[in-house]
Amino acid sequence: MFPTSRRTFMSSTVAASALSAFPFVRSAQGFSAFSKVNLACVGIGNQGGKDIGDLYDTGLCNIVALCDTEIGDTSAKPRVGGILKKFPNAQRFTDFRKMFDKMDKQIDAVLIGTPDHSHFVITMEAMRRGKGVYVEKPLAHSFNQMELLMAAEKKYKVACQMGNQGHSEANYFQFKAYAESGALKGVNKFVAHMNGARRWHKWGGEVAKIKAALAKQEKPDFMDWDTWLAHVADHDYTGQYLNGDWRCFYEFGNGALGDWGAHILDTGHEFLKWGLPTSVEPIKMVGWNPITFPMQCTLQFKVPARGEGLPACDIFWYEGQKNFPEMPEGFSKAKVVTDAPTSGGGSGFGKDLPPGKEVYGDGFVFKGGSHGSTLIPIGPNAKDVEAKMPKYPKSSSSHYKNFLLSVKGEETCRSNFAVAAPLCQFMALGVIATRVNAKIEFDLKTRQITNHEAANAMLHVGEPARKGWEDYFKV
Protein backbone atom coordinates (compact mmCIF):
# COMPACT_ATOMS: atom_id res chain seq x y z
CA MET A 1 0.00 0.00 0.00
CA PHE A 2 2.96 2.32 0.62
CA PRO A 3 5.64 1.36 -1.92
CA THR A 4 9.16 2.69 -1.40
CA SER A 5 10.42 4.63 -4.38
CA ARG A 6 14.07 5.53 -4.99
CA ARG A 7 13.20 9.13 -4.11
CA THR A 8 11.62 8.04 -0.80
CA PHE A 9 14.62 5.82 -0.05
CA MET A 10 17.08 8.62 -0.73
CA SER A 11 15.13 11.18 1.32
CA SER A 12 14.93 8.68 4.18
CA THR A 13 18.70 8.20 3.98
CA VAL A 14 19.25 11.95 4.15
CA ALA A 15 16.84 12.20 7.07
CA ALA A 16 18.71 9.45 8.89
CA SER A 17 21.90 11.47 8.59
CA ALA A 18 20.15 14.53 9.95
CA LEU A 19 18.98 12.52 12.94
CA SER A 20 22.51 11.66 14.00
CA ALA A 21 22.30 14.58 16.42
CA PHE A 22 19.74 12.64 18.49
CA PRO A 23 21.13 10.21 21.09
CA PHE A 24 19.91 6.69 21.63
CA VAL A 25 18.31 6.20 18.22
CA ARG A 26 16.99 2.65 18.21
CA SER A 27 18.65 -0.01 16.15
CA ALA A 28 17.01 -2.15 13.49
CA GLN A 29 16.90 -4.99 16.02
CA GLY A 30 14.51 -3.07 18.27
CA PHE A 31 14.72 -1.18 21.53
CA SER A 32 17.31 -1.70 24.20
CA ALA A 33 16.77 -0.76 27.82
CA PHE A 34 18.51 2.55 27.16
CA SER A 35 17.19 3.40 23.70
CA LYS A 36 14.58 6.10 23.13
CA VAL A 37 11.47 6.23 20.99
CA ASN A 38 11.73 8.46 17.92
CA LEU A 39 8.52 10.49 18.07
CA ALA A 40 6.88 12.50 15.29
CA CYS A 41 4.29 15.08 16.37
CA VAL A 42 1.30 16.12 14.25
CA GLY A 43 -0.57 19.12 15.64
CA ILE A 44 1.87 21.06 17.84
CA GLY A 45 -0.21 23.95 19.21
CA ASN A 46 -2.41 24.17 22.32
CA GLN A 47 -3.00 20.65 23.75
CA GLY A 48 -0.69 19.08 21.17
CA GLY A 49 2.13 21.32 22.37
CA LYS A 50 1.50 20.37 25.99
CA ASP A 51 1.52 16.68 25.06
CA ILE A 52 4.86 17.08 23.29
CA GLY A 53 6.39 18.62 26.39
CA ASP A 54 4.98 15.93 28.68
CA LEU A 55 6.10 13.08 26.42
CA TYR A 56 9.60 14.54 26.08
CA ASP A 57 9.88 15.12 29.83
CA THR A 58 9.57 11.38 30.46
CA GLY A 59 13.10 11.04 29.10
CA LEU A 60 11.94 8.17 26.89
CA CYS A 61 11.71 9.84 23.48
CA ASN A 62 13.42 12.00 20.88
CA ILE A 63 11.30 14.57 19.05
CA VAL A 64 12.35 13.98 15.45
CA ALA A 65 9.58 15.65 13.40
CA LEU A 66 7.06 18.46 13.92
CA CYS A 67 4.06 18.75 11.61
CA ASP A 68 1.37 21.42 11.70
CA THR A 69 -0.71 23.04 8.96
CA GLU A 70 -0.01 26.46 10.55
CA ILE A 71 3.68 25.93 11.12
CA GLY A 72 4.61 28.89 8.89
CA ASP A 73 2.37 31.38 10.69
CA THR A 74 4.52 33.95 12.47
CA SER A 75 1.44 35.24 14.32
CA ALA A 76 0.95 31.76 15.83
CA LYS A 77 4.17 31.95 17.85
CA PRO A 78 2.35 31.75 21.19
CA ARG A 79 0.85 28.43 20.06
CA VAL A 80 3.67 26.76 18.13
CA GLY A 81 6.73 28.99 18.52
CA GLY A 82 7.80 27.57 21.86
CA ILE A 83 7.78 24.00 20.54
CA LEU A 84 9.69 24.97 17.39
CA LYS A 85 12.31 26.73 19.50
CA LYS A 86 12.59 23.85 21.97
CA PHE A 87 13.24 21.29 19.22
CA PRO A 88 15.20 23.11 16.51
CA ASN A 89 16.68 19.88 15.09
CA ALA A 90 13.30 18.28 14.42
CA GLN A 91 12.32 18.32 10.76
CA ARG A 92 9.27 20.44 9.94
CA PHE A 93 6.25 19.69 7.77
CA THR A 94 2.76 20.98 7.06
CA ASP A 95 1.45 17.73 5.52
CA PHE A 96 1.66 14.54 7.58
CA ARG A 97 1.71 12.40 4.42
CA LYS A 98 4.90 14.08 3.21
CA MET A 99 6.39 13.66 6.67
CA PHE A 100 5.81 9.90 6.58
CA ASP A 101 7.08 9.58 3.00
CA LYS A 102 10.32 11.32 3.92
CA MET A 103 10.95 9.94 7.40
CA ASP A 104 9.17 6.60 7.54
CA LYS A 105 12.24 4.66 8.65
CA GLN A 106 13.18 7.19 11.33
CA ILE A 107 9.81 7.30 13.12
CA ASP A 108 8.77 4.81 15.83
CA ALA A 109 5.63 6.51 17.12
CA VAL A 110 3.37 9.48 16.46
CA LEU A 111 1.57 12.01 18.64
CA ILE A 112 -1.67 13.25 17.05
CA GLY A 113 -2.94 16.49 18.60
CA THR A 114 -4.94 17.88 15.67
CA PRO A 115 -8.65 18.87 15.52
CA ASP A 116 -11.14 16.04 16.14
CA HIS A 117 -12.09 15.61 12.48
CA SER A 118 -8.54 14.76 11.34
CA HIS A 119 -7.54 12.34 14.12
CA PHE A 120 -8.75 9.36 12.11
CA VAL A 121 -6.85 9.73 8.84
CA ILE A 122 -3.54 10.57 10.51
CA THR A 123 -3.90 7.67 12.91
CA MET A 124 -4.71 5.23 10.11
CA GLU A 125 -1.67 6.38 8.11
CA ALA A 126 0.59 5.90 11.11
CA MET A 127 -0.80 2.49 12.10
CA ARG A 128 -0.49 1.12 8.56
CA ARG A 129 3.17 2.07 8.66
CA GLY A 130 3.66 0.20 11.93
CA LYS A 131 3.95 3.25 14.19
CA GLY A 132 2.68 3.50 17.74
CA VAL A 133 0.03 6.21 18.10
CA TYR A 134 -0.88 8.57 20.93
CA VAL A 135 -4.14 10.25 19.87
CA GLU A 136 -5.83 13.09 21.70
CA LYS A 137 -9.43 12.62 22.77
CA PRO A 138 -11.97 12.05 21.38
CA LEU A 139 -10.34 9.23 19.46
CA ALA A 140 -12.07 10.15 16.19
CA HIS A 141 -14.94 12.27 14.89
CA SER A 142 -17.55 9.64 14.01
CA PHE A 143 -18.88 6.36 15.37
CA ASN A 144 -17.75 4.52 12.23
CA GLN A 145 -14.23 5.93 12.35
CA MET A 146 -13.89 4.58 15.89
CA GLU A 147 -15.11 1.20 14.68
CA LEU A 148 -12.43 1.16 11.99
CA LEU A 149 -9.70 2.15 14.44
CA MET A 150 -10.57 -0.79 16.70
CA ALA A 151 -10.24 -3.10 13.70
CA ALA A 152 -6.94 -1.44 12.72
CA GLU A 153 -5.53 -1.94 16.23
CA LYS A 154 -6.22 -5.68 15.95
CA LYS A 155 -4.69 -5.85 12.47
CA TYR A 156 -1.53 -3.77 12.88
CA LYS A 157 -0.79 -4.66 16.52
CA VAL A 158 0.93 -1.37 17.38
CA ALA A 159 0.84 0.49 20.70
CA CYS A 160 -2.28 2.70 20.79
CA GLN A 161 -3.18 5.22 23.48
CA MET A 162 -5.92 7.86 23.70
CA GLY A 163 -5.01 11.04 25.54
CA ASN A 164 -7.33 10.92 28.55
CA GLN A 165 -4.49 11.32 31.01
CA GLY A 166 -6.49 10.44 34.13
CA HIS A 167 -6.63 6.87 32.87
CA SER A 168 -3.14 6.38 34.29
CA GLU A 169 -3.69 8.25 37.55
CA ALA A 170 -5.28 7.60 40.96
CA ASN A 171 -8.91 7.58 39.81
CA TYR A 172 -8.18 4.75 37.37
CA PHE A 173 -6.59 2.47 39.98
CA GLN A 174 -9.16 3.34 42.65
CA PHE A 175 -12.19 2.79 40.40
CA LYS A 176 -10.67 -0.43 39.07
CA ALA A 177 -10.08 -1.80 42.59
CA TYR A 178 -13.54 -0.79 43.80
CA ALA A 179 -15.25 -2.33 40.77
CA GLU A 180 -13.25 -5.56 40.82
CA SER A 181 -13.99 -6.03 44.53
CA GLY A 182 -17.72 -5.89 43.79
CA ALA A 183 -18.18 -2.69 45.80
CA LEU A 184 -19.71 -0.85 42.80
CA LYS A 185 -22.00 -3.60 41.51
CA GLY A 186 -25.11 -1.75 42.63
CA VAL A 187 -24.46 1.45 40.64
CA ASN A 188 -27.70 2.42 38.88
CA LYS A 189 -27.15 6.13 38.28
CA PHE A 190 -24.10 8.08 37.19
CA VAL A 191 -24.20 11.88 36.84
CA ALA A 192 -21.44 13.76 34.98
CA HIS A 193 -21.16 17.51 34.52
CA MET A 194 -18.95 20.08 32.84
CA ASN A 195 -20.37 23.57 33.25
CA GLY A 196 -17.55 25.89 32.20
CA ALA A 197 -17.92 28.53 29.51
CA ARG A 198 -17.22 27.17 26.03
CA ARG A 199 -16.06 28.85 22.84
CA TRP A 200 -19.49 28.71 21.14
CA HIS A 201 -21.27 30.42 24.03
CA LYS A 202 -20.16 33.81 22.69
CA TRP A 203 -22.71 33.50 19.85
CA GLY A 204 -25.64 32.63 22.10
CA GLY A 205 -26.82 29.95 19.68
CA GLU A 206 -27.92 32.63 17.19
CA VAL A 207 -27.50 31.36 13.63
CA ALA A 208 -27.04 34.84 12.11
CA LYS A 209 -24.10 35.57 14.43
CA ILE A 210 -22.57 32.16 13.78
CA LYS A 211 -22.78 32.53 10.00
CA ALA A 212 -21.31 36.02 10.18
CA ALA A 213 -18.35 34.63 12.12
CA LEU A 214 -17.84 32.01 9.40
CA ALA A 215 -17.66 34.49 6.52
CA LYS A 216 -15.11 33.54 3.87
CA GLN A 217 -11.64 35.01 4.30
CA GLU A 218 -8.59 35.14 2.10
CA LYS A 219 -6.38 32.18 2.86
CA PRO A 220 -2.93 33.19 4.09
CA ASP A 221 0.06 31.84 2.19
CA PHE A 222 1.37 29.90 5.18
CA MET A 223 -1.80 27.84 5.65
CA ASP A 224 -2.01 24.29 4.27
CA TRP A 225 -5.82 24.40 4.15
CA ASP A 226 -6.24 21.25 2.07
CA THR A 227 -4.39 19.15 4.63
CA TRP A 228 -6.24 20.84 7.50
CA LEU A 229 -9.59 19.80 5.99
CA ALA A 230 -8.28 16.24 5.48
CA HIS A 231 -11.12 14.00 4.25
CA VAL A 232 -13.91 16.48 5.06
CA ALA A 233 -15.78 18.15 2.17
CA ASP A 234 -14.33 21.38 0.78
CA HIS A 235 -15.00 24.49 2.86
CA ASP A 236 -14.17 28.12 2.27
CA TYR A 237 -11.26 29.22 4.40
CA THR A 238 -11.99 31.15 7.57
CA GLY A 239 -9.72 31.67 10.52
CA GLN A 240 -12.74 31.07 12.76
CA TYR A 241 -12.14 27.33 12.45
CA LEU A 242 -8.56 27.56 13.76
CA ASN A 243 -6.86 27.74 17.16
CA GLY A 244 -9.28 25.40 18.89
CA ASP A 245 -12.50 27.03 17.65
CA TRP A 246 -13.13 24.02 15.42
CA ARG A 247 -14.55 22.37 18.55
CA CYS A 248 -17.61 24.61 18.29
CA PHE A 249 -18.87 23.06 15.06
CA TYR A 250 -20.51 19.68 14.47
CA GLU A 251 -18.59 19.34 11.19
CA PHE A 252 -15.19 19.42 12.90
CA GLY A 253 -15.55 18.78 16.62
CA ASN A 254 -17.37 16.71 19.24
CA GLY A 255 -18.08 19.57 21.64
CA ALA A 256 -17.79 19.52 25.42
CA LEU A 257 -18.94 15.88 25.63
CA GLY A 258 -16.19 14.62 23.31
CA ASP A 259 -13.67 16.83 25.07
CA TRP A 260 -14.46 16.37 28.77
CA GLY A 261 -16.52 13.19 28.72
CA ALA A 262 -13.30 11.27 28.07
CA HIS A 263 -12.00 12.57 31.43
CA ILE A 264 -15.19 12.17 33.50
CA LEU A 265 -17.01 9.14 32.08
CA ASP A 266 -13.95 7.03 31.31
CA THR A 267 -13.57 4.86 34.41
CA GLY A 268 -17.32 4.43 34.78
CA HIS A 269 -17.54 3.26 31.19
CA GLU A 270 -14.68 0.78 31.46
CA PHE A 271 -15.18 -0.72 34.91
CA LEU A 272 -18.99 -0.61 35.09
CA LYS A 273 -19.01 -2.16 31.61
CA TRP A 274 -21.56 0.17 30.05
CA GLY A 275 -20.73 -0.72 26.48
CA LEU A 276 -23.17 1.22 24.30
CA PRO A 277 -26.53 2.71 25.34
CA THR A 278 -29.88 1.51 24.05
CA SER A 279 -31.12 5.10 23.93
CA VAL A 280 -29.93 8.68 24.34
CA GLU A 281 -32.47 11.41 25.06
CA PRO A 282 -31.97 15.18 25.26
CA ILE A 283 -33.96 16.18 28.34
CA LYS A 284 -32.86 19.81 28.24
CA MET A 285 -31.66 21.87 25.29
CA VAL A 286 -31.11 25.64 25.34
CA GLY A 287 -29.79 27.55 22.34
CA TRP A 288 -29.97 24.60 19.97
CA ASN A 289 -28.98 25.30 16.36
CA PRO A 290 -27.81 23.10 13.47
CA ILE A 291 -24.24 24.48 13.29
CA THR A 292 -22.76 24.68 16.78
CA PHE A 293 -23.31 22.93 20.07
CA PRO A 294 -26.06 24.37 22.31
CA MET A 295 -25.68 26.76 25.22
CA GLN A 296 -27.00 24.18 27.67
CA CYS A 297 -27.57 20.47 27.20
CA THR A 298 -28.63 17.61 29.43
CA LEU A 299 -28.57 14.07 28.03
CA GLN A 300 -29.84 10.81 29.50
CA PHE A 301 -28.15 7.59 28.36
CA LYS A 302 -29.82 4.29 29.18
CA VAL A 303 -27.68 1.18 29.62
CA PRO A 304 -29.39 -2.19 30.16
CA ALA A 305 -28.47 -4.69 32.87
CA ARG A 306 -25.19 -6.45 32.10
CA GLY A 307 -23.75 -9.73 33.32
CA GLU A 308 -21.96 -10.12 36.66
CA GLY A 309 -24.87 -8.61 38.57
CA LEU A 310 -24.60 -5.12 37.08
CA PRO A 311 -28.08 -3.50 37.06
CA ALA A 312 -29.52 -1.19 34.42
CA CYS A 313 -27.95 2.24 34.73
CA ASP A 314 -28.96 5.77 33.74
CA ILE A 315 -26.03 8.03 32.84
CA PHE A 316 -26.69 11.78 32.79
CA TRP A 317 -24.52 14.40 31.11
CA TYR A 318 -24.92 18.10 32.06
CA GLU A 319 -23.10 20.83 30.16
CA GLY A 320 -23.49 24.59 29.87
CA GLN A 321 -23.16 27.39 32.39
CA LYS A 322 -25.57 27.12 35.34
CA ASN A 323 -26.97 23.84 34.01
CA PHE A 324 -26.34 21.97 37.25
CA PRO A 325 -27.73 18.61 38.37
CA GLU A 326 -29.51 18.21 41.69
CA MET A 327 -26.86 17.40 44.26
CA PRO A 328 -27.05 14.62 46.84
CA GLU A 329 -26.94 15.06 50.61
CA GLY A 330 -23.48 15.94 51.87
CA PHE A 331 -22.19 17.10 48.50
CA SER A 332 -21.14 20.62 49.48
CA LYS A 333 -19.21 19.51 52.56
CA ALA A 334 -17.10 16.92 50.79
CA LYS A 335 -13.97 18.30 49.15
CA VAL A 336 -12.63 16.52 46.08
CA VAL A 337 -9.01 17.14 45.21
CA THR A 338 -8.99 17.78 41.47
CA ASP A 339 -6.19 18.03 38.93
CA ALA A 340 -8.51 19.18 36.13
CA PRO A 341 -7.11 22.06 34.04
CA THR A 342 -9.07 25.24 33.46
CA SER A 343 -11.72 25.34 30.76
CA GLY A 344 -9.86 26.04 27.52
CA GLY A 345 -11.46 28.68 25.32
CA GLY A 346 -13.78 29.88 28.07
CA SER A 347 -13.80 31.85 31.28
CA GLY A 348 -13.09 28.95 33.58
CA PHE A 349 -15.46 27.10 35.88
CA GLY A 350 -16.20 29.82 38.38
CA LYS A 351 -16.89 28.87 41.98
CA ASP A 352 -20.17 27.06 41.37
CA LEU A 353 -19.32 23.56 40.23
CA PRO A 354 -16.06 22.12 38.90
CA PRO A 355 -16.25 19.28 36.36
CA GLY A 356 -16.95 15.95 37.95
CA LYS A 357 -19.36 13.11 38.71
CA GLU A 358 -21.67 11.59 41.29
CA VAL A 359 -22.03 7.79 41.46
CA TYR A 360 -25.23 6.39 42.99
CA GLY A 361 -25.74 2.80 44.08
CA ASP A 362 -27.52 0.56 46.55
CA GLY A 363 -26.62 2.10 49.90
CA PHE A 364 -23.86 4.48 48.75
CA VAL A 365 -23.16 7.74 46.91
CA PHE A 366 -19.71 8.80 45.73
CA LYS A 367 -18.55 12.25 44.69
CA GLY A 368 -15.73 12.52 42.17
CA GLY A 369 -13.94 15.07 40.02
CA SER A 370 -12.36 14.88 36.58
CA HIS A 371 -9.13 13.39 35.21
CA GLY A 372 -7.26 11.60 38.03
CA SER A 373 -9.45 12.84 40.90
CA THR A 374 -10.48 10.08 43.28
CA LEU A 375 -13.97 9.20 44.55
CA ILE A 376 -15.05 9.97 48.11
CA PRO A 377 -18.24 8.63 49.75
CA ILE A 378 -20.77 11.22 50.89
CA GLY A 379 -24.01 11.17 52.87
CA PRO A 380 -24.92 9.96 56.36
CA ASN A 381 -23.18 6.56 55.98
CA ALA A 382 -20.02 7.88 54.33
CA LYS A 383 -17.67 6.62 57.06
CA ASP A 384 -19.12 3.11 56.95
CA VAL A 385 -18.81 2.99 53.16
CA GLU A 386 -15.22 4.26 53.28
CA ALA A 387 -14.27 1.55 55.78
CA LYS A 388 -15.46 -1.19 53.40
CA MET A 389 -13.56 0.03 50.34
CA PRO A 390 -10.44 -1.90 49.24
CA LYS A 391 -6.97 -0.41 49.02
CA TYR A 392 -5.60 0.42 45.59
CA PRO A 393 -2.06 0.74 44.21
CA LYS A 394 -0.29 3.82 42.96
CA SER A 395 0.36 4.25 39.26
CA SER A 396 3.58 2.71 38.03
CA SER A 397 3.81 5.22 35.19
CA SER A 398 2.11 8.35 33.87
CA HIS A 399 -0.14 8.17 30.80
CA TYR A 400 2.70 9.46 28.63
CA LYS A 401 5.29 7.13 30.11
CA ASN A 402 2.84 4.22 29.81
CA PHE A 403 2.51 4.90 26.08
CA LEU A 404 6.23 5.16 25.37
CA LEU A 405 7.01 2.07 27.43
CA SER A 406 4.29 0.25 25.49
CA VAL A 407 5.95 1.26 22.22
CA LYS A 408 9.12 -0.32 23.60
CA GLY A 409 7.19 -3.46 24.58
CA GLU A 410 7.59 -2.97 28.34
CA GLU A 411 3.98 -2.09 29.28
CA THR A 412 0.48 -2.21 27.77
CA CYS A 413 -1.44 0.97 26.96
CA ARG A 414 -4.18 1.53 29.55
CA SER A 415 -6.39 3.55 27.22
CA ASN A 416 -5.82 1.46 24.12
CA PHE A 417 -8.39 1.57 21.33
CA ALA A 418 -10.24 -1.52 22.57
CA VAL A 419 -10.94 0.54 25.72
CA ALA A 420 -11.11 4.08 24.32
CA ALA A 421 -13.10 3.52 21.12
CA PRO A 422 -16.25 2.13 22.82
CA LEU A 423 -16.14 5.07 25.27
CA CYS A 424 -15.88 7.50 22.37
CA GLN A 425 -18.67 5.71 20.50
CA PHE A 426 -20.82 6.08 23.61
CA MET A 427 -20.12 9.81 23.55
CA ALA A 428 -20.57 10.01 19.76
CA LEU A 429 -24.13 8.75 20.16
CA GLY A 430 -24.66 11.59 22.63
CA VAL A 431 -23.34 14.09 20.07
CA ILE A 432 -25.75 12.68 17.47
CA ALA A 433 -28.73 13.00 19.82
CA THR A 434 -27.65 16.59 20.51
CA ARG A 435 -27.26 17.35 16.81
CA VAL A 436 -30.73 16.11 15.85
CA ASN A 437 -32.24 17.34 19.16
CA ALA A 438 -34.26 14.15 19.49
CA LYS A 439 -34.25 10.86 21.35
CA ILE A 440 -32.38 8.14 19.50
CA GLU A 441 -32.76 4.40 19.98
CA PHE A 442 -29.75 2.19 19.34
CA ASP A 443 -29.83 -1.54 18.53
CA LEU A 444 -26.89 -3.22 20.25
CA LYS A 445 -26.87 -6.16 17.82
CA THR A 446 -27.10 -4.32 14.50
CA ARG A 447 -25.24 -1.26 15.86
CA GLN A 448 -27.70 1.04 14.12
CA ILE A 449 -29.99 3.88 15.22
CA THR A 450 -33.43 2.45 14.55
CA ASN A 451 -35.86 5.34 15.01
CA HIS A 452 -34.25 8.29 13.21
CA GLU A 453 -32.91 7.98 9.65
CA ALA A 454 -30.91 11.22 9.68
CA ALA A 455 -29.34 10.34 13.02
CA ASN A 456 -28.39 6.89 11.74
CA ALA A 457 -26.60 8.48 8.78
CA MET A 458 -24.53 10.48 11.27
CA LEU A 459 -22.84 7.30 12.44
CA HIS A 460 -20.78 7.93 9.29
CA VAL A 461 -20.43 11.71 9.64
CA GLY A 462 -17.83 13.11 7.22
CA GLU A 463 -18.28 10.27 4.71
CA PRO A 464 -17.98 9.72 1.82
CA ALA A 465 -14.51 11.12 1.94
CA ARG A 466 -13.16 13.78 -0.37
CA LYS A 467 -11.46 12.50 -3.49
CA GLY A 468 -8.01 11.24 -2.66
CA TRP A 469 -8.87 10.35 0.96
CA GLU A 470 -11.14 7.34 0.38
CA ASP A 471 -8.49 4.70 1.06
CA TYR A 472 -8.24 5.64 4.73
CA PHE A 473 -11.69 4.16 5.31
CA LYS A 474 -10.46 0.66 4.51
CA VAL A 475 -8.74 -1.60 7.02
Image (tube, rainbow, N blue to C red):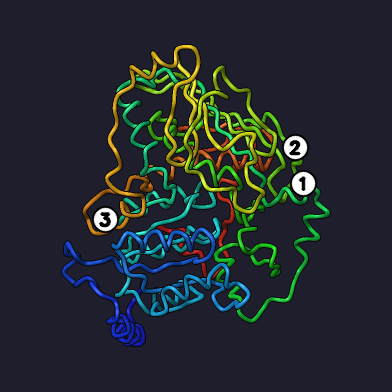
- Tell me the number on the disc at residue 405: 3
- Tell me the number on the disc at residue 205: 1
Look at the picture and state if 398 lies above or below 89. Answer: above
Count residues near mark 1 (Cα–Cα under 10 Å), then give few for <14, some for 14-19, many for 20+.
Answer: many
User: At which x and y percent is residue 113?
Assistant: 48, 60
In which quarter of the view is residue 167 placed? top left
The tag earlier along the polypeptide, 1 or 3, is 1
Q: Which amino acid does the dot numbered 2 rest on?
A: Val
Secondary structure found at label 1: loop
Q: Nearer the viewer, mark 2 or mark 3?
A: 3
Look at the picture and state if 195 lies above or below 183. Answer: below
The tag earlier along the polypeptide, 2 or 1, is 1
Look at the picture and state if 62 lies above or below 451. Answer: below
Give 129 or 81, whichever is nearer the viewer.
Answer: 81
Count residues near mark 2 (Cα–Cα under 10 Å), then give few for <14, some for 14-19, many for 20+.
Answer: some
**Residue at position x 53%, y 70% in the image:** 80
Q: Are marks 2 and 1 in contact (CB under 8 Å)?
A: yes
Q: Which amino acid does the dot numbered 1 rest on?
A: Gly
Q: Which residue is mark 2?
A: 286
The residues bearing labels 2 and 3 have C-alpha atoms spaced at a distance of 45 Å
- 229 relative to 54 in the view: left or right: right
Look at the picture and state if 59 lies above or below 20. Answer: above
